[in-house]
Image: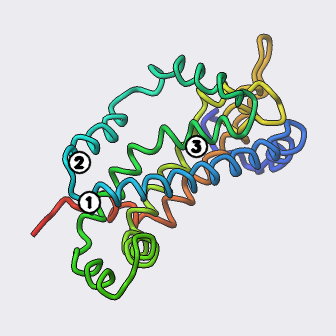
Amino acid sequence: GSPFALPKVPQWQNYVNALTVAGLGRMLLNSVFVGLMATMVNVVVAAMGAYCISRFRFRGRENIFTLFTAGILVPLNALMVPYFVIINKLGLINTYGGMILLYCAIGIPMSTFLIRGLMDSIPMELEEAAYIDGCGFFGRFFHIILPLSRTGIVTAATFQFLTCWNEFVFANLLVSSEKLRTIQVGIRYFTNQFSTDYVSMYAAIMISIIPSIIGYVLFQEQIIAGMTSGAVKG
């Protein structure tokens, strides 16, 4: 038969081997933990930055925003050496904290861009009314702006988590400990100098793409709305 044809009998044992024998289960947990922590920190920091840039009027406001979002244009591979030096000086090589801090930092430009676009569309009158009623800065931010910005926040969080989940270069650069490997780094070890366990490797690849598919299916409406927020004014 054709080598590209689907198998007549599904071989589920390959998935079991990938999860147990190859230790993919632990790598999955590592990826989930690092991705969730980096996403939470990233979204909170980016939302606060976007709120200040969107709501406060001060000299150089747009220049600061341009400086923030300029990070989107810089290829991440060009920053490998400075990032490694910084993480090494902080003593965070071979730690969850090093990966979380790095992923949070590289995702802030895009998250700030997405969330600020939605915050700009929220009427100032809502905040002014809350201010008159005695609502403080954090009250307005957490009880008014954040709920109304949930579309942009969900979009930013989805992109951030999937970036963490699919990232290979920095995870391989910062972590050498087998206990801390993420799933993308783990897939690499299905092959060595003399042989490759293709069946288990492809099973692992199938497992690794499931979160991306689920994330897009669940949040596709929010992602589309978040990407188009601020595109039309008036």
Q: Amino acid at mark 2?
A: Arg
Asked if the residues shown at circle 2 and circle 1 are in contact, with their CB atoms under 8 angstroms apart, the answer is yes
Choose the circle earlier in sequence order: 2 or 1. Answer: 1
- Label 2 SS: helix
**Mark 2 lies on residue:** 61
| Whether label 3 touches label 1, CB < 8 Å | no
Q: Which residue is mark 1?
A: 56
**Mark 2 packing: few (<14 Cα in 10 Å), some, or many (20+)?**
some
| 87 versus 150 height, above or below | above
Q: Nearer the viewer, residue 224 or 10?
A: 224
Residue sitting at x 55%, y 25%: 83
x and y percentages locating residue 8 in the rendered image: 73, 49
On the image, the x and y values in percent for residue 80 come to 53, 21
Count of numbered circles on the image: 3
Which residue is farthest bottom? 133
Looking at the picture, tell me which residue is in the foreground, 175 or 112: 112
Nearest the camera: 63 or 105?
63
Residue displayed at 42% across by 63% down: 220
Quadrant where the image shows the C terminus: bottom left
At numbered mark 3, what does the secondary structure look like: helix, strand or loop? helix
Left or right of 84: which side holds 190? right
**Neighbours of disc 3 within 10 Å: few (<14), some (14-19), many (20+):** many
The residue where tag 3 is placed is 164
Q: Residue 208, located in which quarter of the rendered image?
A: top right
3D distance between C-alphas at marks 3 and 2: 29 Å
Which comes before the other along the chain, label 3 or label 2? Answer: 2
Amino acid type indicated by mark 3: Cys
